[in-house]
């Protein structure tokens, strides 16, 4: 609903309800939701309230003066040889790709300086789930699982990448990170400095990578594309695990915008 509403022309009737974040239209319509009384708000359709409250959260404000965008400081210029993408080649057989993935694992499994991060994301029952499994030779498997509501699938995928990279870069003696994902388009967004919806996620990931690359000249990261149809064991494990989950909303509100709006709900797990 949020994306559809924001794609409407500026004179569409729905914009007489949804507040403008750009100031020029603010308060020019008496029907803006922010001008409604509590009684009026309680009597309108919940999805309109949801759209109004979360449309700006879906497209968070991004500062063009962020340090990662500064000329001469961009990670793509300073560390251009430290990251790479290993993509599936169109027209090549799935068996060849599986062989390449198996060969990579065999080589990496003998080195404790390599962290392999397999990750996935899905949206079910309006709840987005991001999952990552981090494998390091001779160390226990590290799992990370996060749930949230009302975000896009790409944002969930980028958050899974963010969590996996953050976990891997926090480990000592790691010189190489291998990220295995079926969402290579989301991984490429990390290094896209043009204006897009997920720049806050990108900047957080770039910050972790900058710190990681700066620690040692040999530190690097590789992004390996692995389609779910391959049923390749490491990615299949996270894929099966995330599909087995059936998350449900547990907070006592008829619409989620109440939950996301109230600061006291940050501590809901302690109630």
Image: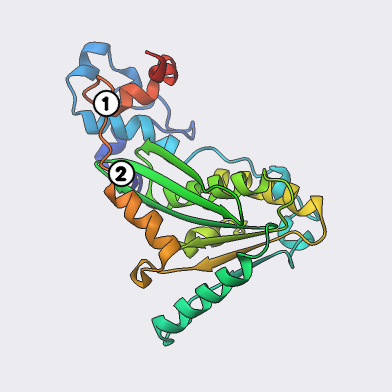
Q: Name the residue under label 1.
A: 250
Front residue of 222/260: it is 222
Name the image quarter holding residue 135. Answer: bottom right
Q: Residue 67 in the image: state x and y as whole percent.
A: 73, 44
Q: Is residue 68 toward the left or the right of residue 104 in the image?
A: right
Tell me which numbered mark, 1 or 2, is placed earlier along the sequence: 2
Q: Residue 96 in the image: state x and y as whole percent.
A: 46, 84
Residue 195 in sight here: no
Q: Is residue 44 toward the left or the right of residue 37 in the image?
A: left
Q: Is residue 18 toward the left or the right of residue 204 in the image?
A: left
Residue 48 in sight here: yes
Q: Which residue lies furthest to the front in this view?
A: 138
**Mark 1, residues whose alpha carbon is within 10 Å: few (<14), some, or many (≥20)?**
few
Name the image quarter holding residue 224. Answer: bottom right
| Mark 2, secondary structure of its residue | helix
Label 1 to label 2, Cα distance in Å? 27 Å
Q: Say which residue appears at 56% left-offset and 43% top-offset.
A: 200
Front residue of 153/246: it is 246
* Mark number, residue 5: 2
Query: Measured along the vertical axis of the image, is residue 214 above or below residue 48?
Result: below
| Mark 1, secondary structure of its residue | loop
């Amino acid at each position: 609903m949020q994306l559809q509403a924001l794609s409407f022309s500026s004179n569409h009737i729905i914009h007489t309800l949804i507040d403008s974040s750009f100031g020029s239209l603010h308060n020019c319509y008496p029907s803006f939701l922010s001008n409604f009384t509590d009684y009026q708000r309680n009597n309108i359709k919940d999805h309109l309230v949801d759209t109004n409250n979360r449309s700006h959260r879906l497209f968070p404000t991004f500062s063009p003066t962020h340090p990662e965008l500064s000329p001469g400081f961009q990670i793509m210029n300073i560390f251009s040889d430290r990251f790479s993408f290993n993509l599936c080649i169109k027209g090549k057989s799935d068996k060849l790709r599986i062989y390449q993935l198996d060969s990579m694992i065999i080589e990496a499994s003998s080195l404790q300086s390599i962290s392999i991060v397999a990750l996935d994301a899905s949206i079910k029952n309006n709840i987005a789930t991001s999952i990552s499994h981090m494998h390091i030779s001779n160390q226990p498997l590290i799992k990370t699982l996060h749930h949230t509501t009302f975000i896009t699938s790409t944002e969930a995928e980028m958050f899974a990448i963010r969590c996996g990279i953050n976990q891997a870069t926090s480990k000592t003696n790691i010189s190489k990170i291998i990220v295995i994902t079926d969402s290579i388009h989301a991984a490429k967004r990390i290094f896209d400095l043009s204006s897009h919806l997920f720049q806050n996620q990108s900047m957080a990931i770039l910050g972790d990578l900058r710190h990681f690359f700066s620690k040692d000249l040999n530190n690097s990261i590789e992004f390996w594309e692995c389609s779910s149809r391959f049923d390749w064991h490491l990615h299949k494990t996270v894929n099966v695990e995330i599909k087995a989950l059936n998350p449900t909303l547990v907070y006592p509100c008829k619409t989620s915008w109440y939950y996301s709006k109230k600061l006291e709900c940050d501590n809901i797990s302690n109630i």
